[in-house]
Image (tube, rainbow, N blue to C red):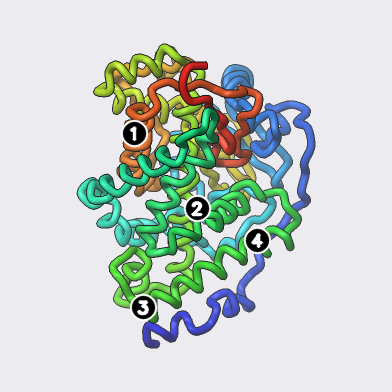
């Protein structure tokens, strides 16, 4: 099979003889009791999940729900870490808790390797990406990222109020990832749509969700074919040419990894940038201190990552078992709330407070275990540069209307709209 042959047909067309997975009834509406009926897609969770998580940690450390076909929510650092490290009993073949469970046969690769992969395949799939995300490789992107941040703020001239989420935070990782993958920078609006469909469209009717996800893979396949015809020095060409076990990657592996980088590489980072700006806008003392002491920013940044960790991951239980006092069934979801783990008072002093000069900060915003975020160096660089440039250029800002701030629902939480007033209130 030649290189071109892999992508002449849509790889999805060859899946007709594979198991279809299982679907369950979509359940929405108000939560009756978070301990027995939780849902990370309801408005009150999106608006402020932390009091809910704190309450559960005290009275029901491992919550349960019948929604999504059945799932569990551990809220202590110890329990979240235990699941994250236990690849023998928990599978990563689907990391978005939804109303669809892909067939077991999809393991160990999963749909978006390596984040959806189980050992031993995971190790080898992840290793393909490591050279692209080293500190050295990331450092080469800092100058362009800084220039982008300045250009975005230049565009604010003459405006008293800006949406720091849509007009600043969201553009930064969209441009960085587009450059890495070799995608047209003007396709950014498509990326925003793909992200919202993937992470917030979980409770859509199955046909609609499949159609929307199909749009993402239609786009990726078009980009792959363009790169096959016009190779260049970027991550897409790297994946097309990469070999594993002595042969080129399957088309589904190439497209799945690109989907992972496009979705996870963008939303997580723009959420972290937006949440940090939201905190500084509503906390003048922290904002003023960072303006006066810019050398404190790397430490403060880690605290923002701890307190406003954007990412929650899911696992699937492999077999029926009794685990830490609860009876888990095969194919139950387990929702790994790294935000809840990061606010566990058993692990962090003053866990619910933002302490921007916190010196010891072993947060888990980037996950734990073999699936710890491969792009953490890139995310940290983007977050640091975005905040450095903002504070340098706009040292005085505040929330224009706190009630107008909206947050994403689902497993990546960050501001979707963030109206800020520039200059004195």
> Dividing the image into 4 quarters, which one contains the N terminus?
bottom left
N-terminal of the two: label 3 or label 1? 3
The residue tagged 3 is: 230
Label 3 and label 1: CA atoms lie apart by 35 Å
Label 2 and label 3: CA atoms lie apart by 24 Å
N-terminal of the two: label 1 or label 4? 4
N-terminal of the two: label 4 or label 2? 4
Q: Nearer the viewer, mark 1 or mark 4?
A: 1
Q: Nearer the viewer, mark 3 or mark 4?
A: 3
Residue 345 visible in the snapshot: no
Q: Nearer the viewer, residue 299 or 97?
A: 299
> Marks 1 and 3: in contact by CB < 8 Å?
no
The residue tagged 1 is: 389
Query: How packed is label 1: few (under 14 Cα within 10 Å), some, or many (20 or more)?
Result: some
Q: Nearer the viewer, mark 2 or mark 1?
A: 1
Q: Position of residue 63 (x, y in %)?
A: 64, 30
The residue tagged 2 is: 263
Picture layout, residue 122 above or below residue 10: above
- Image quadrant assignment for residue 15: bottom right
Q: Residue at position x 62%, y 37% from top?
A: 72
The residue tagged 4 is: 212
Q: Secondary structure at mark 3?
A: loop
Q: Nearer the viewer, mark 3 or mark 1?
A: 1
Label 3 and label 4: CA atoms lie apart by 27 Å
Query: How packed is label 3: few (under 14 Cα within 10 Å), some, or many (20 or more)?
Result: few
Q: Nearer the viewer, residue 378 or 150?
A: 150
N-terminal of the two: label 2 or label 1? 2
Query: How packed is label 2: few (under 14 Cα within 10 Å), some, or many (20 or more)?
Result: many
Label 4 and label 2: CA atoms lie apart by 14 Å
């Amino acid at each position: 099979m030649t290189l071109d042959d892999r992508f002449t047909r849509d790889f999805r067309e060859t899946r007709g003889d594979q198991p279809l997975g299982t679907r369950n009834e979509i359940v929405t509406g108000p939560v009756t009791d978070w301990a027995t009926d939780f849902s990370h897609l309801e408005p009150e969770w999106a608006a402020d999940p932390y009091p809910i998580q704190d309450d559960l940690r005290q009275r029901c450390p491992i919550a349960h729900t019948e929604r999504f076909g059945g799932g569990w929510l551990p809220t202590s650092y110890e329990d979240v870490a235990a699941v994250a490290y236990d690849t023998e009993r928990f599978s990563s073949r689907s990391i978005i808790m939804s109303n669809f469970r892909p067939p077991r046969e999809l393991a160990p690769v999963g749909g978006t390797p390596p984040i959806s992969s189980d050992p031993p395949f995971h190790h080898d799939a992840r290793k393909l990406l490591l050279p692209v995300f080293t500190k050295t490789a990331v450092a080469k992107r800092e100058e362009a990222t800084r220039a982008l941040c300045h250009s975005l703020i230049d565009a604010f001239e003459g405006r008293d109020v800006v949406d720091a989420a849509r007009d600043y935070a969201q553009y930064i990782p969209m441009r960085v990832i587009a450059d890495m993958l070799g995608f047209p920078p003007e396709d950014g609006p498509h990326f925003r749509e793909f992200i919202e469909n993937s992470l917030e469209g979980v409770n859509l009717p199955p046909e609609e969700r499949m159609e929307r996800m199909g749009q993402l893979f239609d786009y990726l396949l078009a980009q792959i074919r363009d790169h096959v015809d016009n190779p260049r020095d970027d991550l897409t060409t790297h994946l097309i040419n990469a070999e594993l076990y002595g042969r080129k990657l399957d088309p589904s592996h190439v497209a799945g990894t690109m989907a992972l980088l496009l979705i996870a590489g963008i939303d997580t980072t723009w959420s972290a940038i937006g949440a940090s700006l939201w905190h500084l806008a509503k906390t003048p003392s922290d904002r003023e201190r960072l303006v006066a002491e810019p050398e404190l920013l790397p430490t403060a940044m880690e605290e923002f990552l701890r307190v406003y960790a954007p990412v929650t991951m899911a696992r699937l239980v492999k077999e029926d078992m009794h685990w830490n006092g609860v009876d888990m069934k095969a194919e139950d979801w387990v929702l790994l709330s790294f935000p809840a783990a990061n606010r566990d008072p058993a692990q962090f002093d003053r866990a619910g407070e933002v302490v921007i000069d916190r010196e010891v900060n072993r947060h888990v915003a980037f996950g734990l275990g073999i699936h710890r975020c491969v792009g953490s160096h890139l995310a940290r660089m983007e977050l640091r540069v975005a905040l450095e440039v903002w504070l340098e250029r706009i040292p005085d800002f505040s929330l224009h209307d706190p009630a107008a701030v909206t947050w994403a629902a689902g497993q990546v939480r960050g501001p979707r709209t963030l109206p800020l007033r520039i200059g004195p209130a």
